[in-house]
Image (cartoon, coloured by chain):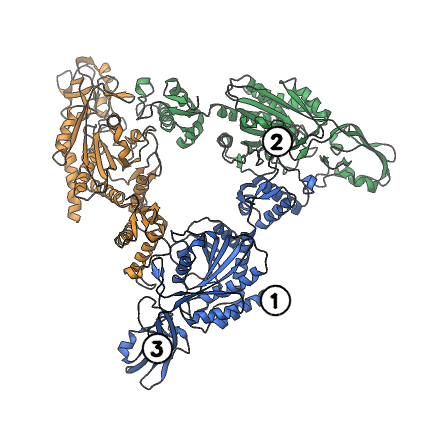
Chain colours: A blue, B green, C orange
Amino acid sequence: MEDNFTAVGEQMHQLITSLYPICRSITGDGVRQSFEIIKKFIPLAVYEVPSGKKVFDWNVPKEWNIRDAYIKNTRGEKIIDFKNSNLHVLNYSIPVHKKVQLAELKEHLHSIPEHPDWIPYRTSYYNEAWGFCISHNQLISLEEGEYEVFIDSSLEEGSLTYAECFIPGKLSDEVLIFTHTCHPSLCNDNLSGISLSVFLIRHLMQQKRRYSYRFVFAPTTIGSIVWLAENESNVFKIKHGLICTLVGDTNEFTYKRSRQHSAEIDQIAEYVLKRKSTENKIIDFFPFGYDERQFCSPGFDLPVGRISRATYGVYPEYHTSADNLEFVKASALQESLNIFEEIIEVIETNKRYINQSPKGEAQLGKRGLYSVIGANNEKMHFQLALLWVLNASDGSQSLLDIARKANMKFEDIKNAADRLFECGLLKEKDS
Amino acid sequence: MEDNFTAVGEQMHQLITSLYPICRSITGDGVRQSFEIIKKFIPLAVYEVPSGKKVFDWNVPKEWNIRDAYIKNTRGEKIIDFKNSNLHVLNYSIPVHKKVQLAELKEHLHSIPEHPDWIPYRTSYYNEAWGFCISHNQLISLEEGEYEVFIDSSLEEGSLTYAECFIPGKLSDEVLIFTHTCHPSLCNDNLSGISLSVFLIRHLMQQKRRYSYRFVFAPTTIGSIVWLAENESNVFKIKHGLICTLVGDTNEFTYKRSRQHSAEIDQIAEYVLKRKSTENKIIDFFPFGYDERQFCSPGFDLPVGRISRATYGVYPEYHTSADNLEFVKASALQESLNIFEEIIEVIETNKRYINQSPKGEAQLGKRGLYSVIGANNEKMHFQLALLWVLNASDGSQSLLDIARKANMKFEDIKNAADRLFECGLLKEKDS
Amino acid sequence: MEDNFTAVGEQMHQLITSLYPICRSITGDGVRQSFEIIKKFIPLAVYEVPSGKKVFDWNVPKEWNIRDAYIKNTRGEKIIDFKNSNLHVLNYSIPVHKKVQLAELKEHLHSIPEHPDWIPYRTSYYNEAWGFCISHNQLISLEEGEYEVFIDSSLEEGSLTYAECFIPGKLSDEVLIFTHTCHPSLCNDNLSGISLSVFLIRHLMQQKRRYSYRFVFAPTTIGSIVWLAENESNVFKIKHGLICTLVGDTNEFTYKRSRQHSAEIDQIAEYVLKRKSTENKIIDFFPFGYDERQFCSPGFDLPVGRISRATYGVYPEYHTSADNLEFVKASALQESLNIFEEIIEVIETNKRYINQSPKGEAQLGKRGLYSVIGANNEKMHFQLALLWVLNASDGSQSLLDIARKANMKFEDIKNAADRLFECGLLKEKDS
């Protein structure tokens, strides 16, 4: 098991490694290439939505592609080369090819003085511009003189690309897992979520499922808006949702509640994270961060929370070249995958039952379920779990509600419910 | 008063003393003999429910009776004699008469190694067996050899016996007090509750009553289930209920809330116990313990709580020969009776009123109820109580609600309400 | 600004100074003279309600007027003279002119042993009596002998006088500010509230107003009861109300909640007072104090709270000659006025909006409202305020609700809402 544990984490890291070099953006071939790689692991339906299409308050942007880019110094030496790091180019840069003096060049350069060795990641999606991102040490060493700047990109009518993996279950009710796919060579921010989703899909495809599962891979913000616009008539099926991102670092987990505040997914995620470690944090919804902002906009208000480890925007490596293959760890990825699996396990089994013998207690003895006082602790504990489930199962309380009220583990309550269900003492609510 | 105080406690203890020698069980003549003794104190209607009758998920068990039992050693000496203690026989033992070797005998002996001088109390209601209970010291001193075991019992079609004392009041709404009656020579566990109920009935019969009171004396578990099944069409009348047991020891009181959690009885019991002592404990409902489990099963969910002193199952004397006449104290019994009387006093008077002059304050001065600022503290306090009752009496708040909001004693609020009612400034809600 | 600050406070104090010498009561010419002075500052409609008129549980009392009063000693010297202080006469004293021995005189004298230099303020509205109030030092120095007592008062059919200043706004919904006017030479207790109301009216008349404002000047208790009886058909218009009294001393503020406990006015007053100082206190409603008792009687239950500084009944100067022109401070009056102005500012602007682009986030960038991460703190803060308003504006939450949830200042949330409203992204609820 320990071997398997490491093994899956290593595979997750290997998938990240193979996706790392690709220059992704909110549109373009980098996304399509990434999806081709992912398709080797899981079935994936890829969708193209044309530039200019109205999606609620937005329009699908032009498609951006890039082939090459560099800066040459006076001596004709490439001092910046896109081939070394796709972060070097301002994402969504318009094409440019000209000679500029250092002063003008500097207006188009981005660096991070606080981390002089790192290259920042910058974008300009909705404001046409060109630019380069370089380490601050390199920036300050640039000599006066003429530089040749070259960006071989295109910004044209095309489409925005997103993908779905749908895994049907017994119910048409859906669990949504959303991961963004628009960042170039950044590992924790987008690749960790992609990799976790892929391996979670592989896990789920081997399970018997009550719910149907829909995994969405799309660019952040515009991607979730596009997806909501394209799928508006079906969002009512979403009973639980999670945004999956920043899951490869070694920080404790943070669950950000949905706007509904105590939806079932909020209760389940809190339960699973808190029993894992009291260091894990549960925070209330706020209207910024990742794509939960779209799913939790007031016109949808879906029960969608977010699980992350590093905190959005505040860890130093955020949106820099330091968010690299070393920053994400196989063991952390595996641990994150386990958390998602555990949450899904509770989602699948957190049913509401109705006691079929609700007047007085059922006679457990004639069903072989009675333990006398003085029986061993394990038997007594099971007996108490049986009594809690029977007493609380009036259809209003889920098994997790009962576990919390009884101060018992969810699994113990679930096992008791399973035994009572087998005896015919419980019926599922709504079935 | 002090004399009277001790006097009633002593009488309660004397009743326990007279019931102590009888071998009670969930059925049988021991219960009937006990009811005959109780009938000398209060009117009692006795009911017999035949063996085999279906009661919800259960059936009324066969009736058990016992006349004699002993164990004789190789020398023909009685080393265990039912006549010395009815705890010696496993309650509901089937008849047996044979000779056995020590090894076989030991499979039928029960003792308590932690308390080597005490005889345990054990039962086998739903699993036909025979057995003896002995002190651990005696158990380990038994020599090898042949023993004669003799139990002159019968387990046959018969009936289960329970009794009721109904005291009618102005309303058909009922207060239920339930006490179990199925334990043999155990004092705190069953006899203390029986004795308290008897003396509470005597007290209530001398009072003017708003509510009707129904006292039920029945075996635990099967008895409350039988009673609920036999009286199902009338349980809607139960507005408040208390299980009365373990009330003769000297521990502080514990109130276990009903499943409804904040029914009026829960609020009243909490108020009375907490003002008596902050040491008294209020605990939430859980689905094990005594007969509250039946009344609070989801198919009934009645407002029935439990008042006890010692904690069910965890005090050392529980279900042993040490729960004897010394373990229960006259003063403790009297104190418990007082608590029940105080709770009933609040139940009787905790009305909701409607202010008949709700627009602006009523002019208290013209009714002789106005105290100027600077009046003595007692008058001012009464004045504030009048103002609280008038302001809060919109029909939604009981006098106890008002007392808690005003942070005043229930009696002060009640006295203010009485005065305002006399003036015509209040009307009772629903009357 | 600092000059202006002091200037308004000084004017408030001057108005108090000009009203101070007048002998007011719950009826009579003192009230009318006071209203004539106030009319120089603001428009005022004066109402007379005839003695004997039934008002709910009360009747309008006879009108009381007084011209002169004194006590002369044996030598014919005036030892007490109404002209020196109108507190010397028991308010509502019936006329008297006779000679009495010291012992009899003393039955009609009131003093404060704890504060031997102060004259108490005493009344006898509903119990016909005569009396004088004197310093305790003077009382104990009185020599045996015959005294001439003279009170030239009248208690006759007449009327009770109250006044209103109504300032119409865009809505017919009203904000009520109530101030009592029945105390003679007492500054904090009645004059501070009158002065604050007058200057608040002058402030409001210069503002654009959403709500209509109704200021009521009337005697305490009987005055608010009369006003409610006379205006019963219109009280439904009152959306928010404040009792204004004891606002000239230098204590921290206390807000006493309405009976509704968390009406919008309760939330707003708590927010404004708490952000001003954590020393300010918020207390729950209780049915004594000032005129909130009438507005919050169960037959009306209006959202009317009270703002005061000194605590009713417990500060030493309460109802004594020490509640004088020195006890109230210009700076404190000004500060109190500012608090009322700030509360009204929030009342006026605490709207509920509905996001007009509720599906996904609105595209702020195309409206010039988008700040990238890394923008300066002020811009980022504004951006977050925009996102909070958009996300929360489903019509159920007011701007104050949003400010509290976002942990931001009300003004920042309001400014964000203003900008979004200008863009057409918000519509007012119910408009």
Task: Kindly indicate the quadrant of the structure image that contains residue C206.
Answer: top left
Identified at 70% across, 32% down, the residue is B321
Q: Mark 2 lies on which chain?
A: B
Residue A8 shows in this picture = yes
Residue extending furthest toward the right: B75
Identity, as a three-letter code, of the amino acid under mark 2:
Leu
Q: Mark 1 lies on which chain?
A: A
Give the crowd class for mark 2: few <14, some 14-19, many >=20 residues within 10 Å. Answer: many
**For this view, does A259 lie left or right of residue C230?**
right
Q: Nearer the viewer, mark 3 or mark 2?
A: 3
Instruction: Give the spatial CA distance, label 3 vs label 2.
Output: 87 Å
Dots 3 and 2: beta carbons under 8 Å? Answer: no
Give the crowd class for mark 1: few <14, some 14-19, many >=20 residues within 10 Å. Answer: few
Q: Is residue C313 above or below residue B419?
A: below
Q: Position of residue A150 (x, y in %)?
A: 33, 79
Q: Do labels 2 and 1 share a chain?
A: no
Dots 1 and 3: beta carbons under 8 Å? Answer: no
Residue extending furthest toward the bottom: A75
Q: Mark 1 points at which residue?
A: A3
Q: Which chain carries label 3?
A: A
Instruction: Give the spatial CA distance, label 2 vs label 1.
Output: 57 Å
Judged from the image, the secondary structure of the residue bearing numbered disc 3 is: strand
Give the crowd class for mark 3: few <14, some 14-19, many >=20 residues within 10 Å. Answer: many
**For this view, does B291 lie left or right of residue C325?**
right
Q: Mark 2 points at which residue?
A: B246
- From the viewer's side, name the closer residue of B397 and A58: A58
Task: Kindly indicate the quadrant of the structure image that contains residue A23.
Answer: bottom left
Q: Residue A151 carries which label?
A: 3
Q: Where is residue B119 in the image (x, y as percent from the top left)?
A: 73, 35
Q: Where is residue B57 in the image (x, y as percent from the top left)?
A: 65, 35
